[in-house]
Amino acid sequence: MTTPHLKKSIGRSPLRLSLISRAVCLGAVILICASASAQNLFVADSGGSGNIYEFTPAGVRSIFASGLSYPSGLIFDSAGNLFAAVNGTIYKFTPAGVRTTFAVGFNLPKLAFDRAGNLFVSDLGTGAIFKFGPNGTKSTFASGLNTTTGLACDSAGNLFVSEYGSGVKGGTLNGVPVIYKFTPDGARTTFASSSELNAPLALAFDSAGDLFVSDDTVTDSTELQTFPGGIYRFSPGGARSTFAPGFTPFALAFDSAGNLFVSTDAIYKFTPGGVRSTFATGLGGPLAFGKPSARPPTDFNNDGKPDYLLYNSSTRQTAIWYLNNNVHIASASGPTLPVGYGVVGVADFNRDGKPDYLLYDPITRQTAIWYLNNNVYTGGAYGPTLPGGWELVATGDLNEDGKPDWVLYNSSTHQTAIWYLNNNVHIASASGPTLPAGYGVVGVADFNRDGKPDYLLYNPSTRQTAIWYLNNNVYTSWAYGRTLPAGWNVVGVADFNRDGKPDYLLYNPSTQQTAIWYLNNNVYTSGAYGPTFPAGWSVVAP
């Protein structure tokens, strides 16, 4: 909290701007992911370390990025990329931590994404808010602002902007404290006025659409009367209630469970009921919860790296080979399958954070799910029975509801279909695109990184691969992938080198050798050999 005696007469002096900059540096956060999955907290430390730290829900800390001084904002896009405003430059980090420069030339920018993928950036020097479209095109969204300390977008795409004002109760130098609401087309109205605010520092929306505001403590011009601040909750209609009196953090962020995390000289956590606890000490700065890290579907040991699922058709035994990129580091026996069933996919069907087996009996067309804890069977449930003529070829969250779905294929008609599931229960269906002759679906992944899973197709006769880009079940476009060398097949897809881009898993059944082809969308960038399997074993996932 800034001290009252400094706020009285500093006007637009460097000291005044330093106070605003502290609020700016710590105040711009919005949660754009509505998934209930556990999320990691990212903190851009403003204490001089130059690090962006990543905290697991349990509070385990690691360094995500370093060499960054004077952070002023963090925000995730819907694809899980982290945008960081640092010393007037906006950097973009892939989920794997690869950094590129997105934009430069801003004065203490704050950041917010709307659900259409537009990035809003405020600039304290010009008093403007700029809008970057999903393709990076920059335009001026609003102007005439003065002391912007926070940005946040609601679920309808409206942008909310907090103005700190003079920092003196009743003062008008540098404007008055206010929260503006901008519609998507830029129309501005006042959402909360100086009668309800002292000097707002930060904004964040919860999943119910309530706007939380950190409001600073100020004095009047005589410094004889103090007006305590706090964290306030504003309903969508503008009704104000007090959430945490006397507590004035410089950054706010909600996790997917509805807990509010705030930053002062430490990181504190408030439950939805307002109970406060200390989450981390010794640091403070901009906060962001983004899209949960896309844990690989075959990450059985929960180390963030895809693993191989192997199957021996003679013994019906499964095994898990734990990998670090293309390197086999350990193995474990998995459960033995019942007669008639094979594993056709791996996904977290019961959403306990652990991969499960999807089983299929081609004779009875019965499906089943075996729930696992790493390599240990814990329970099972029957899934739906497939209609005649259809086979189960892939899994993926096609409708983006956080639940794995099934991709079905009819070899006679070349038609695909999507079965939407809730755990093992079939809840709806949709026709997918019809494949060209000779091609089959061998995997599902988001190759063009638009947040939507795509089909990986393979023609074993020509060894040609292709990617069909989808919007749920709807085909939108396509691109050829690389042709495989003789003797090799593409059998799966996963992000083995963790650069945020799906890679091909190749297998040579004659030599039992595996290989990984690293891709950028449909473009081959490099390759590496993977482990060779023992006799009798083959890879069934990823």
Image (spheres, rainbow, N blue to C red):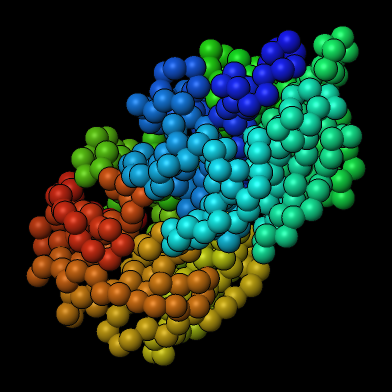
Q: Quadrant of residue 92?
A: top left
The quadrant where residue 281 appears: top right
Would residue 150 be seen by someone viewing this image from the given angle?
no
Q: Nearer the viewer, residue 57 or 205?
A: 205
Give percent across and percent down for residue 137: 45, 61
- The residue at the far bottom in this view is 413
Rendered position, 253 above or below 397: above
Q: Is residue 491 left or right of residue 266?
A: left
Residue drawn at (38%, 63%) of the image: 448
Residue 366 vs 30, above or below: the answer is below
Q: Is residue 232 left or right of residue 438?
A: right
Q: Viewer-proximal residue, 170 or 347? A: 170
Q: Image point 86% across, 46% down: which residue?
A: 238
Q: Is residue 246 above or below residue 259?
A: above
In terms of depth relative to the viewer, which is nearer, 370 or 244?
Answer: 244
Residue 381 location, x and y as percent?
Answer: 58, 56
Q: Where, by quadrant of the figure, is residue 65 drawn? A: top left
Say whether residue 146 is visible. yes
The quadrant of the picture occupied by the N terminus is top right
Residue at 34% x, 44% y is 100
Give percent across and percent down for residue 374. 44, 39
Give the image location of residue 525, x and y in percent. 19, 56
Which quadrant holds the C terminus? bottom left
15 relative to 303 in the view: left or right: right
- Which residue does the image show at 26% across and 74% down from the upper left? 480
Q: How many marks?
A: 0
